[in-house]
Image (cartoon, rainbow, N blue to C red):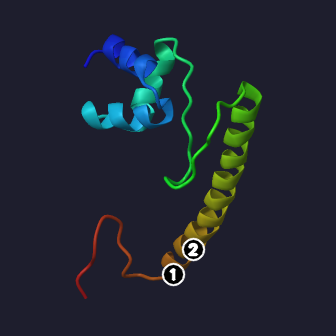
């Protein structure tokens, strides 16, 4: 599908939040790539980063939508910070083990 066709399909979709994933699957792309195509094509993308169970039953204002995205960014930032702490701890410990070799296992 061309970029123009992707934008047209998105515009015509009844459930735009689900259409991003559908277009990604149909075109063997990642959802982020589809979003980039849509934004480049001038579409006002509404992507909802929720677990699949949560549904929004009404149309949201731009302010409400941005609030949802901001909250999700805060959640992700917190998760990343926690993961980064663990990563640094493991990396620090690994420096003290002589058998740790970058790129694979070393035979003993």
Mark 2, secondary structure of its residue: helix
For residue 63, the mark is: none
Q: Which residue is mark 2?
A: 92
Crowding at mark 2 (Cα within 10 Å: few <14, some 14-19, many 20+)? few
Which of the two residues, 2 or 65, is positioned nearer the viewer here?
Answer: 65
Can you tell which of label 2 and label 1 is closer to the viewer? 2
**What residue appears at the point 63 percent right and 53 percent down from the top-left corner?**
76
Q: Position of residue 29 (x, y in %)?
A: 31, 34
Q: Quadrant of residue 60?
A: top right
Is 8 left, or right, of 78 in this rendering? left
Quarter of the figure that contains the C terminus: bottom left
Q: Percent from the top left, x then y, of residue 1?
A: 25, 19
- Residue 16 locus on image (x, y percent): 48, 29
Residue at x 65%, y 65% (from the top left corner):
82
Other-residue count near label 1 (Cα within 10 Å), few / some / many at <14 / 14–19 / ≥20: few
Using residue 78 as the reference point, say whether residue 108 is left or right of it: left
Q: Nearer the viewer, residue 27 or 104?
A: 27
Lateral position of residue 55 relative to residue 103, left or right: right
Tell me whether the residue at label 2 lies in contact with that at label 1, contact meaning CB atoms closer than 8 angstroms: yes
* Residue on which disc 1 sits: 96
Look at the picture and state if 51 lies above or below 28.
below
Identified at 56% across, 45% down, the residue is 49
């Amino acid at each position: 599908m061309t970029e123009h066709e992707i934008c047209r399909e998105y515009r015509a979709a009844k459930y735009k939040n689900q259409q991003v994933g559908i277009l990604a699957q149909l075109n063997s792309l990642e959802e982020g790539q589809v979003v980039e195509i849509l934004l480049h094509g001038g579409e006002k993308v509404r992507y909802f980063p929720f677990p699949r169970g949560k549904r929004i039953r009404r149309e949201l204002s731009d302010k409400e939508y941005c609030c949802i995205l901001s909250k999700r960014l805060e959640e992700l930032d917190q998760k990343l910070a926690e993961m980064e702490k663990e990563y640094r701890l493991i990396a620090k410990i690994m420096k003290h083990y002589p058998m740790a070799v970058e790129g694979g296992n070393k035979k003993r």
